[in-house]
Image: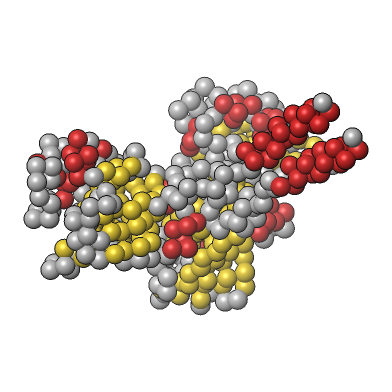
Amino acid sequence: MARSFRALILLLVLILTGCGTEEPETTPLILLKAGGVFTADGSAVAPGGTLRFGLSVSGGGGAITNLVVRRVSDGVTVTEADRGMYISYGGLDTTLIYTRGYGQVEKWVFSVMNSFRDTASVSMTVLKGAGSAWGEISYHPSVRIGLQDNSSLPHFADLHSGIAYDGAGVAGHESEVDMAAFWYLTSGNSSPTLTCPAYSSALTYYPLFGSWSVKNQTMYDYYTSDNNLVTPAQFDLAANDSLLVNAYRPGSVSGQSKYAYTGKVVPFRTADGKYGLLKVIHADETPSGEMEIAVKIQK
Amino acid sequence: MKKIFALFMVLPLVAVMISGCEKEKEDPSVKLGAQANTTIPGFYSVSLDKTYTMSQAADNSASIDIFCFYEAETGNNIALASPGSGITGIFTGDDMPDNWSIKNTTYFFLTTLTQAQFEAVQNGDALIETSHDSANARRKAKDVQVGQVWSFKTQSGTYGLLLATAVTQGANGSVTFLVKTK
């Protein structure tokens, strides 16, 4: 009987250990698209010129979980984007648009990671072209929006057009909304705050965002704002998109920007890749108050 | 009696052991014979992932997207085309594609993808579609070489990539490839 019992135990061990599944070997794939609409490896683009990168990404057997874009300008690396995602089927096909900076040589590195933490990268070099190609901007000198409890002013701003929508009028324009604002106390400090439809905590103040199929993510450069790196006078003088692009520090951005007090200038980048600056003309520090901003944004 | 009881206890466990482990995967390769190959079917349905002899294909012409043929003189060598490609003088007999009422056309484009890159691509990836250059696609995949990755688009709009893994030249030759589709 003891022998049979031992045999049974042995069999159970074999069953439990014999069919072990190993983690699959996966190799994600990331390719840069070629063709006339995309920036070519080794091409020369003047500062301010548009860089257009087409990426085709496959998870290689795992879900795509992360895409990182780095610009190495004359040896200095800046992370332009670090996006978490979970794409388990169909891969990723996307076009990224950036603006050529002042460096002599820019190397662009695109890296992808899958759910097995396997990675792949692809890179290209963009040389500095002659002259400059800074682009035109749109200027909206006064955009007034209400803070969360304001019932008389609209709340949802399209920074491209300078139009603000109220809760009823925004129907059909959800994909155009880049910004909203609210006021709260954070660590005991009064904070008029910029937010955007894709920022999760914005739902606390604007539950309507939860029902939108398109929730734009505007990224605000809080570092430049907090440290007053762009003054209102510099904002007023900006006549092309040079300051808009160069003021934006992609390493210190968020979908929410606190302490947007009167006089602050906040660089931002919209979901469709447009760089801009907003100047806070006036910000109330009460939930029923309002915020008036001036906006300069790439055309 | 105890032994018989123990045997009945153990047998199901052994059965679980034998059947529970993952089966060896079948070879997903597609092998197509050229026009004079009498052992390997030469016609292929992408949507059904199924090969046909010419007579079978004639009865299922709506499903046929790709066939293999050999033509040395024109430099086509072992090549892939489709019933709607207008290939003439290759197949003979009543069942030849010229006589079919439905002749699907598939377009091919030779990509720069490597074998390793092909292997990383998953069925359904957008990359399968974006790899296809419609402006430069042709109705033949000429002189298919081992290691080449061709993109294709079938008449019904299915995009695919195929990696050639073996080629045997000659009218009785063949081509073997792996397919990924979107």
| Residue A195 image position (x, y, % from top left) | 64, 40
Above or below, A174 against A250 in this view is above
Above or below, A286 against B94 in this view is above
In this rendered view, identify the residue nearer to me: B108 or A208.
B108
B66 displayed left or right of A11: left
Q: Residue furthest front?
A: B1
* Residue in the image at 87% along x and 37% along y: A5
In this rendered view, identify the residue nearer to me: A129 or B180.
B180
User: Is residue A295 shown to the viewer in this render?
Assistant: no
| Residue B56 image position (x, y, % from top left) | 22, 39
* Residue in the image at 22% along x and 36% along y: B60
In this rendered view, identify the residue nearer to me: A248 or B26.
B26
B96 displayed left or right of A250: left
| Residue B73 image position (x, y, % from top left) | 12, 68
A99 displayed left or right of A248: left
Coloration of the structure image: secondary structure
In this rendered view, identify the residue nearer to me: A229 or A176.
A176
- Choose top left, top right, bottom left or bottom right for residue A248: bottom right
**Can you say which quadrant of the picture contains the N terminus of chain A?**
top right
User: Is residue B15 shown to the viewer in this render?
Assistant: yes
* Residue in the image at 33% along x and 39% along y: B47
| Residue A272 image position (x, y, % from top left) | 48, 47
* Residue in the image at 59% along x and 36% along y: A197
